[in-house]
Each structure stands twice: as structure tokens, then as C-alpha cells.
Image (tube, rainbow, N blue to C red):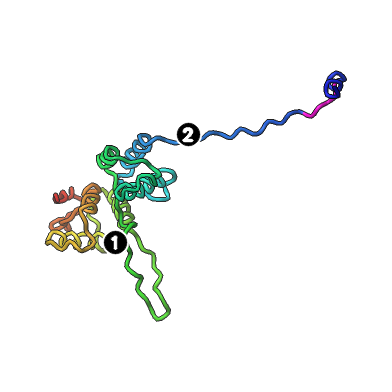
Amino acid sequence: YRLARLKKDNFPFPATVEPPKIPVVKRKTFDERLQEFVEWKNEHKTPLVPSQCGQLGEWVNMVRRSLKLFQAGKKESMKIYLNDEKIQRLKDAGFVFQTAEHRERRPEPKTKRGPMKRPRKTFEEGVQMFVAWKNEHGHPLVPQSSGFLGDWVHSQRRAYVKYQKGRRSGSMTPERILLLQQAGFVFDASGHHSRPAKVAKAAPST
């Protein structure tokens, strides 16, 4: 009765405040993320998406973790659902499931004052530096005198020679050989040193 009386007398009731609407963020599907990965790989000439590369970098890491769970039979713990068909599609797209960042690193050398602190670059960072250098100079023949990159290129060639001789316990793996081939790496630079501007020799097949 009192409420009806107040409404009849045009009582100034406070305006109803509606709660703010929370925007719904649509999650990209597996197909959309895979297409985004392929476009990134084609643009940067490498399939090694850095972890810091926004949502795509996070997705790549989650795919790798989900694959480990898939192989261990813990499919219920996967953040990204994988099956044999999706895994094959990832392989066809050039996805790299295992990188050097997931392996154990050797302990840092020590000095009298304690562990020696120095920046360490991963294999993937070395590949990215090589691709950037090749695109800038127009050829893949990095001189050994070119600081870190020159030493890195030389070490990859030595590791490849050891791998070809059957010493498979070193740092070279079939996955790394494939990545280097895709990047245009020259495994045998003999005969190219005097004329580095010429077209590089094709990488040997594995």
C-alpha cells in the first residue's frame, strides 16, 4: 500500500543501476591458431615462435606441453586437445615440438668469485640471428670473424660433421638439421670463401 501511494505521488525513486557488461572474449579455434602460426612462419622464415610473441607464443608453448601429456596418456590434463589428426597437421605445417629450451642446460662455468654470469643464446635465437644476417647481406656465408654469429655458424658445421660420422651424442639432431636447411644454412662452405656473394651451396640432405 505504501509503495503504491508513493508511486501515485510521483516519489523520486533512485534510478536503477545496471551492472556493467563484461565483454566476451572469443577464443580462437585450433584451426585459426594453426593458420596464424603458418602465416608467422612464412613471414619470419622460421617456425620457432618466441615465447614472448603474445598469444601465439603462449599457444605454441601450450601445444608442446599438451603433446607431452598426450604421449604420457594424460589427455584429461591437456589445455589444448590434441589427437593423431591434429598432431599430423602440426607436423605438416612445420611445427617444432621439441626445442633446446626444453632440454637440460649445462652448469655455468665458475670463477673464484662464484658462477660466471654471461648471456646464453638458445639454438633458436642463433637461427633467427642467422636468418636476419642472411636477409641483410643477401647470402648465407657468415664470416667466422663476425663475432658470436660467426662462432655459432662454425660450431653448427662442426657439430654436423660429427653427426655425419655417427657421433649422435652431440648437439646436432635431425630436428636441428631440418631447421638449418629451411633457413638456407650452408653446411659445407669450402670453395665459397673467396666469392661469398655467389649463390650458396645447397644444404646436404639427411
Quarter of the rendering occupied by the N terminus: top right
Q: Residue at (17%, 61%) from the top-left corner?
A: 168
Choose between 47 and 67: the one closer to the eye: 67
Q: Main secondary structure of the magenta part?
A: loop
Q: Position of residue 123 (x, y in %)?
A: 30, 57
Instruction: Classify 162 as above or below 69.
Output: below
Q: Position of residue 108 (x, y in %)?
A: 36, 70
**Earlier residue among tags 2 and 1:** 2
Label 1: how many residues lie within 10 Å, few (<14), some (14-19) or many (20+)?
A: few
Give the alpha-carbon distance from disc 2 to disc 1, as whole Å: 46 Å
Provide the residue span drawn in magenta. Answer: 10-14
Q: Is residue 60 left or right of residue 1?
A: left
2 vs 1, front mark:
2
Q: For the residue marked with disc 1, what is the amino acid? A: Ser
> Does the magenta run of residues contain 139?
no
Q: Is residue 179 left or right of residue 57?
A: left
147 vs 185, nearest the viewer: 185
Residue drawn at (86%, 24%) of the image = 2
**Looking at the picture, how far across and down is residue 187, in whole percent?**
18, 55
Q: Please tell me which residue lies in front, 179 or 33.
A: 33
Q: Secondary structure at mark 1?
A: loop
Whether residue 1 sits left or right of residue 39 in the image: it is: right
The amino acid type of the residue labelled 2 equals Lys
Question: In the depicted view, which residue is nearer to us: 42 or 18?
Answer: 18
Measured as percent of width and height from the top left, residue 180 is found at 23, 51
- Please name the residue shown 37% across and 34% down the image: 32
Per the image, the residue denoted by label 1 is 146
* Relative side of 2 to 43, left or right: right
Q: Is residue 70 above or below residue 89?
A: below
Q: Which residue is mark 2?
A: 26
The quadrant in which residue 9 appears is: top right
Other residues around mark 2 within 10 Å, as few (<14) / some (14–19) / many (≥20): few
